[in-house]
Image (cartoon, rainbow, N blue to C red):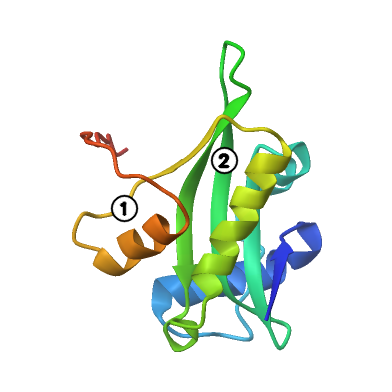
Amino acid sequence: MEIVKVDEGDFDRLAKLLNWRKTGTYDEDFNWSAFLSNELSDMIASNIIWIYAARVNNRFVGYVSAAKIPKPDNRKCTIYIDELWVAKKHRNKGIAKKLLEKVIEEAKRIKAWKVRLVVNYDNAFARSLYHSLGFNEKPAVFCEKSF
Protein backbone atom coordinates (compact mmCIF):
# COMPACT_ATOMS: atom_id res chain seq x y z
CA MET A 1 0.00 0.00 0.00
CA GLU A 2 1.28 3.42 -0.95
CA ILE A 3 -0.07 6.90 -0.13
CA VAL A 4 0.12 9.28 -3.09
CA LYS A 5 -0.82 12.91 -3.64
CA VAL A 6 -3.45 12.96 -6.37
CA ASP A 7 -2.65 14.98 -9.49
CA GLU A 8 -4.23 15.23 -12.95
CA GLY A 9 -2.68 11.95 -14.02
CA ASP A 10 -4.67 10.21 -11.27
CA PHE A 11 -8.13 11.57 -12.15
CA ASP A 12 -9.27 8.30 -13.74
CA ARG A 13 -8.42 6.32 -10.58
CA LEU A 14 -9.87 9.04 -8.33
CA ALA A 15 -13.19 9.12 -10.18
CA LYS A 16 -13.44 5.32 -10.03
CA LEU A 17 -12.80 5.48 -6.28
CA LEU A 18 -15.42 8.20 -5.74
CA ASN A 19 -17.91 6.22 -7.81
CA TRP A 20 -17.06 3.12 -5.72
CA ARG A 21 -17.86 5.11 -2.57
CA LYS A 22 -21.15 6.31 -4.08
CA THR A 23 -22.35 2.99 -5.52
CA GLY A 24 -20.61 0.40 -3.34
CA THR A 25 -19.19 -1.31 -6.45
CA TYR A 26 -15.85 -0.84 -8.17
CA ASP A 27 -16.36 -0.30 -11.92
CA GLU A 28 -13.16 -0.61 -13.96
CA ASP A 29 -14.93 0.83 -17.02
CA PHE A 30 -16.46 3.85 -15.26
CA ASN A 31 -16.36 6.94 -17.52
CA TRP A 32 -14.86 9.56 -15.29
CA SER A 33 -14.65 12.60 -17.57
CA ALA A 34 -18.10 14.00 -16.67
CA PHE A 35 -17.89 12.90 -13.03
CA LEU A 36 -15.19 15.17 -11.63
CA SER A 37 -15.50 18.91 -11.10
CA ASN A 38 -14.18 21.03 -13.96
CA GLU A 39 -12.39 23.11 -11.35
CA LEU A 40 -10.57 20.16 -9.77
CA SER A 41 -7.47 20.56 -11.94
CA ASP A 42 -7.17 24.23 -11.04
CA MET A 43 -7.76 23.61 -7.34
CA ILE A 44 -5.14 20.86 -7.16
CA ALA A 45 -2.65 22.88 -9.20
CA SER A 46 -3.09 25.90 -6.92
CA ASN A 47 -2.67 23.74 -3.82
CA ILE A 48 -6.00 24.97 -2.36
CA ILE A 49 -7.04 21.39 -1.77
CA TRP A 50 -5.02 18.27 -1.22
CA ILE A 51 -6.25 14.82 -2.04
CA TYR A 52 -4.18 11.87 -0.92
CA ALA A 53 -5.11 8.38 -2.01
CA ALA A 54 -4.13 4.93 -0.83
CA ARG A 55 -3.02 2.83 -3.79
CA VAL A 56 -3.05 -0.96 -3.74
CA ASN A 57 -2.17 -2.86 -6.93
CA ASN A 58 -2.50 0.35 -8.98
CA ARG A 59 -6.07 0.91 -7.72
CA PHE A 60 -7.11 3.63 -5.29
CA VAL A 61 -8.82 2.07 -2.25
CA GLY A 62 -9.18 5.11 0.01
CA TYR A 63 -8.69 8.85 0.11
CA VAL A 64 -8.59 11.94 2.27
CA SER A 65 -9.35 15.44 1.03
CA ALA A 66 -8.22 18.54 2.88
CA ALA A 67 -8.50 22.26 2.22
CA LYS A 68 -6.23 25.11 3.22
CA ILE A 69 -8.16 27.96 4.81
CA PRO A 70 -6.06 31.15 5.01
CA LYS A 71 -6.18 33.34 8.10
CA PRO A 72 -6.18 37.18 8.00
CA ASP A 73 -3.59 37.48 10.76
CA ASN A 74 -0.25 35.88 11.60
CA ARG A 75 -1.75 32.39 11.81
CA LYS A 76 -0.79 31.02 8.40
CA CYS A 77 -3.77 28.75 7.74
CA THR A 78 -6.01 26.05 9.11
CA ILE A 79 -6.20 22.72 7.34
CA TYR A 80 -9.73 21.35 7.19
CA ILE A 81 -10.11 17.63 6.56
CA ASP A 82 -13.28 17.41 4.53
CA GLU A 83 -13.56 13.72 3.66
CA LEU A 84 -11.90 10.47 4.65
CA TRP A 85 -13.04 7.18 3.16
CA VAL A 86 -11.61 3.68 2.76
CA ALA A 87 -13.33 0.87 0.85
CA LYS A 88 -14.88 -1.68 3.24
CA LYS A 89 -12.67 -4.59 2.21
CA HIS A 90 -9.58 -2.45 2.92
CA ARG A 91 -10.63 -1.16 6.34
CA ASN A 92 -8.89 -2.06 9.62
CA LYS A 93 -5.53 -2.19 7.85
CA GLY A 94 -4.24 1.20 9.00
CA ILE A 95 -5.02 2.94 5.70
CA ALA A 96 -7.14 5.73 7.20
CA LYS A 97 -4.42 6.43 9.75
CA LYS A 98 -1.75 6.61 7.04
CA LEU A 99 -3.90 9.00 4.99
CA LEU A 100 -4.43 11.28 8.00
CA GLU A 101 -0.75 11.14 8.90
CA LYS A 102 0.09 12.38 5.41
CA VAL A 103 -2.19 15.42 5.82
CA ILE A 104 -0.75 16.13 9.29
CA GLU A 105 2.80 15.83 7.91
CA GLU A 106 2.01 18.33 5.15
CA ALA A 107 0.29 20.69 7.62
CA LYS A 108 3.41 20.68 9.79
CA ARG A 109 5.64 21.21 6.76
CA ILE A 110 3.78 24.39 5.75
CA LYS A 111 3.46 25.51 9.40
CA ALA A 112 -0.33 25.46 9.48
CA TRP A 113 -1.96 26.76 12.64
CA LYS A 114 -4.29 23.77 13.17
CA VAL A 115 -5.86 20.76 11.51
CA ARG A 116 -9.62 20.48 11.98
CA LEU A 117 -12.31 18.01 11.07
CA VAL A 118 -15.89 17.12 11.92
CA VAL A 119 -16.97 13.62 12.92
CA ASN A 120 -20.36 12.20 13.84
CA TYR A 121 -20.66 11.85 17.60
CA ASP A 122 -21.72 8.19 17.34
CA ASN A 123 -18.73 7.20 15.17
CA ALA A 124 -16.65 5.78 18.01
CA PHE A 125 -14.15 4.08 15.70
CA ALA A 126 -13.29 7.32 13.88
CA ARG A 127 -13.16 9.32 17.11
CA SER A 128 -10.74 6.79 18.56
CA LEU A 129 -8.57 7.05 15.45
CA TYR A 130 -8.51 10.85 15.67
CA HIS A 131 -7.64 10.74 19.37
CA SER A 132 -4.75 8.37 18.62
CA LEU A 133 -3.35 11.01 16.25
CA GLY A 134 -3.55 13.79 18.84
CA PHE A 135 -6.87 15.39 17.91
CA ASN A 136 -8.84 16.86 20.82
CA GLU A 137 -12.62 17.09 20.86
CA LYS A 138 -14.08 20.55 21.38
CA PRO A 139 -17.62 21.42 22.44
CA ALA A 140 -19.25 22.99 19.41
CA VAL A 141 -22.38 23.11 17.33
CA PHE A 142 -21.99 22.25 13.68
CA CYS A 143 -24.23 24.26 11.35
CA GLU A 144 -24.81 23.60 7.69
CA LYS A 145 -26.91 25.01 4.87
CA SER A 146 -27.57 22.86 1.83
CA PHE A 147 -28.34 24.08 -1.67
The answer to whether 120 appears left or right of 80 in the picture is left
Mark nearest the camera among 2 and 1 is: 1
Q: Residue 103's spot in the image, x, y percent?
A: 61, 52
Q: Is residue 120 above or below residue 72?
A: below
Q: Are marks 2 and 1 in contact (CB under 8 Å)?
A: no
Q: Earlier in the sequence, mark 2 or mark 1?
A: 2
The answer to whether residue 35 is visible is no
Dot 1, how many residues are within 10 Å of its Cα: few (below 14), some (14-19), or many (20+)?
few
Instruction: Kindly identify the residue that appears in the image at 63 percent across and 86 percent down.
Output: 28
Label 1 belongs to which residue? 119
Which quadrant holds residue 52?
bottom right
Which amino acid, by three-letter code, is at mark 1? Val
- Disc number at residue 67? 2
Q: Residue 121's spot in the image, x, y percent?
A: 20, 54
Instruction: Kindly identify the residue that appears in the image at 31 percent across and 53 percent down.
Output: 119
Q: Is residue 113 above or below residue 125?
A: above
Front one among 9 and 52:
52
Which amino acid, by three-letter code, is at mark 2? Ala
Dot 2, how many residues are within 10 Å of its Cα: few (below 14), some (14-19), or many (20+)?
many
Outermost residue toward the right?
A: 9
Which quadrant holds residue 16?
bottom right
- Measure the alpha-carbon separation of dots 2 and 1: 16 Å
Q: Quadrant of the N terminus?
A: bottom right
Front one among 44 and 56:
56
